[in-house]
Amino acid sequence: MTTNQFEHKLHEFKQYLQKMKSYEEAIGLIYWDMRTGAPKKGIATRSEVVGVLSGEHFKMSVASEMGEWLDYFSEPEQDARLNRVERKIVAECKKDYDRSKRIPPQKYQDYVVLTSQSESVWEEAKHNSNYAIFQPYLEKIVATNLEFIDLWGYQGHKYNTLLDMYEPGMTVAKLDQVFGALREKVVPLLSAIQASKHKPETGFLKQTFDKEQQKKFSLFILGQMGYDFDAGRLDETVHPFATGLNPGDVRITTRYLLDDVNSALFGTIHEGGHALYEQNISPDLIGTPLCTGTSMGIHESQSRFWENMIGRSRPFWNRYYQDVQKHYPGQFDSVRVEDFYRATNEVKPSLIRIEADELTYNLHIMVRYEIEKELFSESVRVADLPEVWNEKYRDYLGIAPTTNGEGVLQDVHWSGGAFGYFPSYALGNMYAAQMMRTIRKELPDFDGLLEAGNLIPIKEWLSEKVYRHGKLLTPTEIITEVTGEELNPDYLVDYFQEKYGDIYKL
Amino acid sequence: MTTNQFEHKLHEFKQYLQKMKSYEEAIGLIYWDMRTGAPKKGIATRSEVVGVLSGEHFKMSVASEMGEWLDYFSEPEQDARLNRVERKIVAECKKDYDRSKRIPPQKYQDYVVLTSQSESVWEEAKHNSNYAIFQPYLEKIVATNLEFIDLWGYQGHKYNTLLDMYEPGMTVAKLDQVFGALREKVVPLLSAIQASKHKPETGFLKQTFDKEQQKKFSLFILGQMGYDFDAGRLDETVHPFATGLNPGDVRITTRYLLDDVNSALFGTIHEGGHALYEQNISPDLIGTPLCTGTSMGIHESQSRFWENMIGRSRPFWNRYYQDVQKHYPGQFDSVRVEDFYRATNEVKPSLIRIEADELTYNLHIMVRYEIEKELFSESVRVADLPEVWNEKYRDYLGIAPTTNGEGVLQDVHWSGGAFGYFPSYALGNMYAAQMMRTIRKELPDFDGLLEAGNLIPIKEWLSEKVYRHGKLLTPTEIITEVTGEELNPDYLVDYFQEKYGDIYKL
């Protein structure tokens, strides 16, 4: 009888979770649609639809049934009957449930309204470089997050609680260590690069490039990466993204700049990396909360692995540069593959994170990390952020913005309350370099595969080691099982030193 | 206090309805996506999402709260406080609620599964012209509908209950009368046309036409009609349709045949007519069950008005033929506008409804109407349908199919249980002709507007008279208020006689 009861409850619980996943999928499709071409006059009503579906989803996540199931399956007797996947599902749901339940519903509702208004205000503030109109919103958002942290609880630094939302297990102590080590090597490397007389020529990247050809080339490269077009599609958008609605429907968007051959290309490879992850999650996990990437950092490691470690590598271009030449006839006749390779790897401190090169990108992240850490230790005031921002840019990158629009207001994240998210980007670079080291050992002729345009074994290796697990393994388990050690920034440093030492003849 | 209670209940009721509408909108978007390019490997999971959302929507429509609200607002005291829109909303909900509540949930669930399976079986049956595999499904569907009719109740003919679902208030008695009158004039007219020596030349319609140009021309004509591209978009699909997600987001799909210049064009105008209806429903009705067309027949009257009364008229082509010539350079050099006009109005009995001309189309509908009527008076057996079908085609159109694929199996409707739907198409033609008579009186230089390419006053007239009301008025109210009399088939007959008398010199 108790076995029957157990089985029955487990079945009901799984159906409930599948239903929640259905809501997420519907919401995901609506967002994709809003960003790829939904008619603007329908947006107001469509936003209400999102509100209804999100509301139902949230209600389900904190419903009393959910609490009862979690209590039941956490009893030692029942827990012992769960298999590994089921146990992880219960743990994930419990984490979400506990987090959501601690926030009074009205406070949460107010916060949703606040961040939604704040995003519109931020847009205007950025457009007019007017920090003053955004400041009161940001102050409220930070204050509310501090209240939430008190309700959720924290260990060590308050900011740890926020970091954990995007990178389970990540802490200030760990980030201080890895970012410190990284900065220590990146800053002198950047100085050496800036002092080098062997700078790449980049003018030929800035011609006018036919949009249809850019699209064809993007599709071609996605096909080479093993992106499954029966389980996805490529569309245009303003801010590119990838979205995994289910492993059979993982969509990519990109943006074509007519005067820049590389923007859409590397954007597509980047989102393609995210998409390969989502397309190759084990079908066993479909309909469960484990059917997604394990963390933002690991997800970003995959987009950056494909974009940078593969897409900006010499052997890759030894194979594919001929296709650039074919897609843009006459436009690269006098450009050698080596020139193209060096140009795509130009390092140059700049003000805008999303336009930064592979090396300085990490410094942009560290600036934001330092500021967030100080915000949540309450050692910096929101009012002072523009000044703090500019100072840190001078300190980390040697340049500073002249307007807040290209400074403290450049990113959308804070307006939506996404504190703790930025470090994922730099973590992704470190995870990627560390995995690169391992993959080179396990696929010994790695460069040969790239030179031959045979990328599929690489996709399969990553599927086996990373993608298929979805959220079944933690980020730490993934990186440890794949590479044999925990996160170690040295691999990224080594990769940078080798790559740029060669390009800039240091 | 009771006023407060009334206001409070009314507010809650409206919010509830808006929530139901949100589910409908989400489901509508998912269907649009599935038919315009959703990756095929994601469809299985997406279908579960549709199942979850439809299930929630159905639950809400029969929930006890709904019953309580309907009882409350039906009390004379409360009813007196409702405004006209609110009263109609209550009536609409009550109609749906009563219909849904009378079917035992398990029976309804079984029926959903049956029709869903049946649609797949039908596809195979049609493909292989194999009626035998479809027959048992159709038998069950008819039998279940007969059971449902007994549960719902009926007045006069059992088929009336089905007709009412698509055309509120329509009956067998009325249809027998109008279809009888129509047939009586259409059949001799068709004979005269077939005997005419002045048949149009049509060969030039069947060249090869560039798809991009077809698309451009479709978009151009939609713009001329006053279709609002900020409240819609045009996409490609296999079976064209229009879908009104909300009045700010009404999407059209079309299909481009490379060897037929008219298929996409008239398909687009047809769906454009449906879309104008949905785009111009009064914003006051958004979020209520009245925010949709009043019936299938009135909806179809608008698609057919634009497709046929305008799109296949001489003054229209006097203005727009130059654009055909421009879009397909050199392909119509030797074709005069009069030849083009006559070719687009060729009348020729054929086997396939969706390829039929404007005149014989109605005969295709009458065949189906007669069969459905007999099925629900139980005077014909499902097993005999292929024979009955072929006999009626000989009788009505003078030709008969040689396979069931191009005969009784050609339409999807019956496999999904949509009995009572077909008459809407012919009703649409009759409503359209009747409105045409009125609009010619009220916009005296109607032909002049077409000749000048000034279609907007026509769209505005229809918006004012038909579109803005949504489902607030019944089909009978609409046609009576617009034209001053009830449905009258004579206007369609007059229109046919005048048009074809001229073209075929009868």
Image: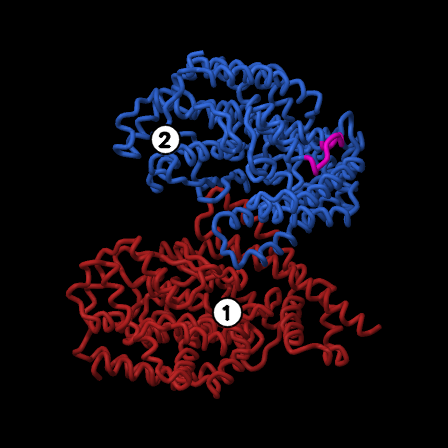
Chain colours: A blue, B red
Where is residue A300 shown, x and y percent of the image?
Answer: 55, 29
Q: Residue furthest left?
A: B334
Q: Quadrant of residue A20?
A: top right
Quarter of the image for residue A102 reads top right
Mark 2 — residue?
A205
Quadrant in which the C terminus of chain B is drawn: bottom left
Q: Is residue B262 left or right of residue A3?
A: left
**Residue B158 appears in view:** no
Near mark 1 (Cα within 10 A), the count class, few <14, some 14-19 or many ≥20, is many
Residue A400 place in picture, x, y as percent: 56, 30
Q: Which residues are magenta?
A: A375-384
Residue located at (59% from left, 52% from top): B51
Q: Quadrant of the N terminus of chain B?
A: bottom right
In the rendered image, residue A432, in percent from the top left (x then y), is placed at: 54, 22
Q: Which residue is mark 1?
A: B280
Q: Is residue A179 magenta?
A: no
- Residue lying farthest front? A402
**Is residue A331 visible from the viewing direction of this image?**
yes
Q: Which residue type does callout 1 highlight?
A: Asn
